[in-house]
Amino acid sequence: MSIQTIITQPFGDQKPGTSGLRKRVTMFQQPHYLENFVQSIFDAVGAPAGASLVLGGDGRFYNVEAIQVILKMAAANGFGKVLVGRNGILSTPAASCVIRKYQTFGGIILSASHNPGGPQGDFGIKFNTSNGGPAPEKVTEEIFARSKQITQYSIVDAPDVALDVPGETELAGMKVEVIDSVSDYAELMASLFDFAAIRQLLSSGFRLKFDAMHAVTGPYARAILVDALGAAPDDVMNAEPLPDFGGGHPDPNLTYAHDLVEIMYGDNAPDFGAASDGDGDRNMILGKHFFVTPSDSLALIAANARLVPGYTQGIAGVARSMPTSAAVDRVAEELDIPCYETPTGWKFFGNLMDAGKVTLCGEESFGTGSNHVREKDGLWAVLFWLNILAIKRQPVETIVKRHWARFGRNVYSRHDYEELPSDAANGLIEHIRASFASLPGKVFGHYRVKECDDFSYMDPVDGSISQKQGIRILFEDGSRIVFRLSGTGTEGATLRLYLEAFEPDMSKHDLDAQDALSEMIAIADEIAELKQRTGREQPTVIT
């Protein structure tokens, strides 16, 4: 098993986005493309000789092939041990759990999250640090810098490692331990939630439906919801992870989780519905004929945290991404705890959690989590809701509407315009920036613009600054419109439009969000020249 030094050249396009490098599978299949990026990771992070590493992915197409390459490169680069999920499977939150439990140097996670899979789909790779969270910007910038200068990489010439049976083998002097993908994570969930109360709820006639979307969460949901908590086997649908996610788009929203939505809005609907995404870090929560926005879900979890065993001592603080609604801010104010507003990207929450400043975090993009790991965690959010339901014994809709009655409703929606020509998307953003001087004080219907800016963030822990994180149009009544280009797509550009209005009047809490926000939707079109510049009459996805 000799170490080979392979001469290569930079590709120039390996700049990580908000959560790693994501490209089409065909890009990663080019000779040297994956290897270049992996070597750039190893060069940038500077792991000491004999360091340990966690490795796994969401099971999408090219996952197993990439794992074999990374194992051989890890051996050639001096790692002493790699913990790899059985059959290459590890959900993103489970990988974070394993990194933290076994105190490894870090981990490499293979996923393009909620993006489509298959031979013509997407693939992704990211490095998580020893705290279990995504590498901070200073690390990803160094990885990108190395990728632009790379001239060679090291790899062991060796047969592939068997990944189908748990146990330990050796690869060129490096130990490879194949671990059960689920057990460490399931053990952590059992330590946080009242499984006995949830088990009693599920045995009382309460009905649920969880959609794993043929993605990585299926085995975790079966082990926890079915085996540990007593749900019926068919309560977990689309549970078998498939390389192409069954031809679906593993994004748990009202558009792409349509099978679940039809069940939850149909006749004889279950009491509770939920879905998770490609790598298991996102979640969607539904009641009977009722959708819970991710922003409201975060606020509800914060308001009810003391009902859950792992959080009975209360929460230190909360954090949300800037585009996420201010619903959780109102809860934090009542609880007299700090609330932080960060750029989009879970890596920004890591410092706050490590410093003990926050316990709960969330993003409007269906991501919720806490300091139990350093990633958002789809199944954790589902279990949190089930724990709340087990204690309150009220329908999901009732719990949400009583929350609104107490705190007011932050009416909220996100409109996604996917795969736009990059020139058109960038031109739209520049057009809005050029309007900054003239917008303050301007009146649009019932709304007057108070101020507008390009959101920037100074990390309160390390002082690092992130700029141009999204355009905010703030109105005098607290309503707002946010425009942001997403960093998670692989084709063209995705423009996200966020709309929010605070409604304290209970008589208006039943209004559909799109109706309640109709005037703001028109204002956004007027300010950004949306239809004219995108050529689209409607968004691709509305949530």
Image (cartoon, helix red, strand yellow):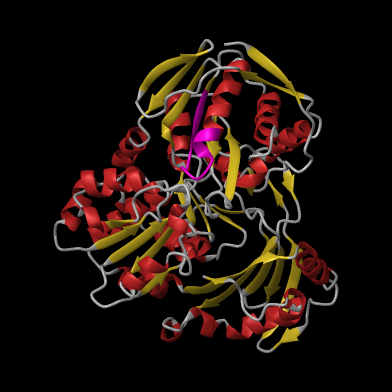
In the figure, is residue 12 to the left or right of 473?
right
- Asked which quadrant contains residue 207, the reply is bottom left
Residue 426 image offset from top left, x and y in percent: 79, 64
In the figure, is residue 147 to the left or right of 479?
right
Question: From what the image shows, is residue 469 above or below residue 287?
Answer: above
- Residue positioned 63% across, 43% down in the render: 20
Does 2 lie within the magenta span?
no
In the figure, is residue 509 to the left or right of 229?
right
Residue 368 image offset from top left, x and y in percent: 47, 53
Q: Is residue 321 visible?
A: yes
Residue 298 image offset from top left, x and y in percent: 45, 59
Question: From what the image shows, is residue 543 above or below residue 60?
Answer: below
Question: From this viewpoint, which residue is outermost toward the bottom?
Answer: 445
Question: From this viewpoint, which residue is outermost toward the left?
Answer: 204
**In which quadrant will I find the N terminus?**
top right
Residue 169 image offset from top left, x and y in percent: 42, 16
- Asked which quadrant contains residue 324, the reply is bottom right
Task: Count every numbered label the image shows and give the total.
Answer: 0
Q: Is residue 277 visible?
A: no
Does 59 lie within the magenta span?
yes
- Asked which quadrant contains residue 69, the reply is top right
- Residue positioned 60% across, 17% down in the render: 156
- Magenta-tinted stretch: 53-65
Question: From what the image shows, is residue 125 above or below residue 238?
Answer: above
